[in-house]
Amino acid sequence: MPNSISLNQAYPVVTESDKLYARATGLVPAYTQTLAKGPGQFVKGVAPKYVKRGNGSHVWDVDGNEYIDYLMAIGPLVLGYCYDKVDAAIKAQLADGITFSQMHPLEVEVAELIREVVPNADMVRYSKTGCDVTTAAVRLARAYTGREKVLCCGYHGWHDWYIAVTDRNKGIPKAAQDLTFTFNYNDIQSVIDSIDHETACVILEPMVFELPKDDFLHKLRKVCDEYGALLVFDEMWTGFRMAVGGAQEYFKVDADLACFSKAIANGMPIGVVCGRKEIMQLCEKDVFFFTTFGGEALSLAATKATIEELREKNVPLQLAAQGKKLKDGYNAIARELGIDYTACSGHDVRTIITFDAKAGNPLEMKSLVQQEMIKRGVLWGGFHNMSFSHRDADIAHTLDAYREVLAMLKKAVDEKNVKGYLKGEPVEPVFRKTSNFNMKPKQKASV
């Protein structure tokens, strides 16, 4: 019988997941379309690999095992799976059609709505993914300033201008690699050391897990103004989650351009770049950014319904309230057990659990916690991506599971045998980091 949401006595059977995995071998590169969903991020031999359906905050894998989901499709499901209002909007639009031969009214209606809720969104352009719109923002910045250099901080997608600074940069021309540089979050000096009068823009995730300190974002705005560079916010995680208007609203900092995806449509594929009119209007003739599916109506219908629900129900407030219970609860359990090598941190709407290397291999400790949380009916990747559908019962069960699992972790660490408790292969590292991400040295343009 498949596992349910309980403190199960046995690990889930994942036979059907393994069969699909075998079929994908040699057929689907890396097995996955998204690294964060791939098998390398889950304990092999224990965790499910394929999820078949979801409802609210719960998912069921292909073997029928049920879990509370704290990944939420790696961010998009801010309201939850099969959310009635959004699904009804999609179904209503589906009855009329998906993609048309001319423009659709939703293109105007959604743009007006975004302009209402997002600061400085004078004009709006759609695409399908987050990396589409961050790349469009970089192209707009280069066109507007007449410069080529880009400074970035965080993760911005797979396109050449960004992925060139990672260790997965094969196939990218050297000329492209030489135009992008990185800086450290909350380190304004690292920006000052890298920016110059050939910098087109500074693009960053306004927050990942670490809150801005010492007026970092406000200082960044000032530095960009001094050098004539545009400030671009990549709001894939902060947008429509920290506040309906995103980081600009929450931190009261104006960006020149802002990019959104994930939470804006509760799982439907859409990306948005918006910002100051004098920049965005370059998309009319000077900058080519057009795509067949930019006006696809199902995603626009979902976007409209999602934003209306976020605003009407003040969803960010609820996300923060439920997320705080998990964060505070986890840390309280760790303190009670006398564990000082793991903690939960971040903004309440999206938190991360970290493990200190002083106690052992962090990936092995994470893997043990994941393995045992999955056994207890919690799909866990080290994060709490909160949704509006996470109920008090979900939080209570998760904290009960943490109490058991952290006690097991303490025992394994005390025995210096975390790896011995693993039932499968541990999770693998990925290239993404939240700080010191491939920092390049200062490189000023020659005079």
Image (cartoon, rainbow, N blue to C red):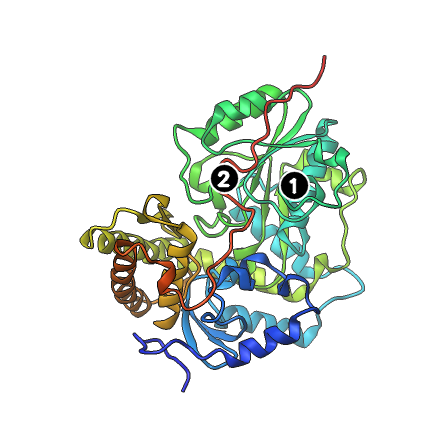
Q: What residue appears at the point 32 percent right and 49 percent down from the top-left corner? A: 343
Q: What residue appears at the point 72 percent right and 27 percent down from the top-left corner? A: 147
How many numbered discs sit on the rendered protein?
A: 2
Circle 2 sits on which residue? 206
Q: The residue tagged with tag 2: helix, strand or loop?
A: loop
Specify few, some or many for label 1: CA neighbours under 10 Å numbering under 14, 14-19, or 20 or more: many
Closest to the observer, 388 or 347 = 347
- Residue 268 on image: x %, y %: 59, 63
- Amino acid of disc 2: Pro
Circle 1 sits on which residue? 162
| Badge nearest the viewer, 2 or 1 | 1
- Amino acid of disc 1: Tyr
- Distance from the alpha carbon under mark 2 to that under mark 1: 16 Å
Report which quarter residue 364 is drawn in: bottom left
Closest to the observer, 113 or 179 = 179
Q: The residue tagged with tag 1: helix, strand or loop?
A: helix
Closest to the observer, 249 or 139 = 139
Q: Quadrant of the C terminus?
A: top right
Q: Is residue 375 left or right of residue 230?
A: left
Query: Which residue is farthest top?
Result: 447
Q: What residue appears at the point 50 percent right and 72 percent down from the top-left corner? A: 82
Which numbered disc flags the more N-terminal residue, 2 or 1? 1
- Residue 327 on image: x %, y %: 31, 53
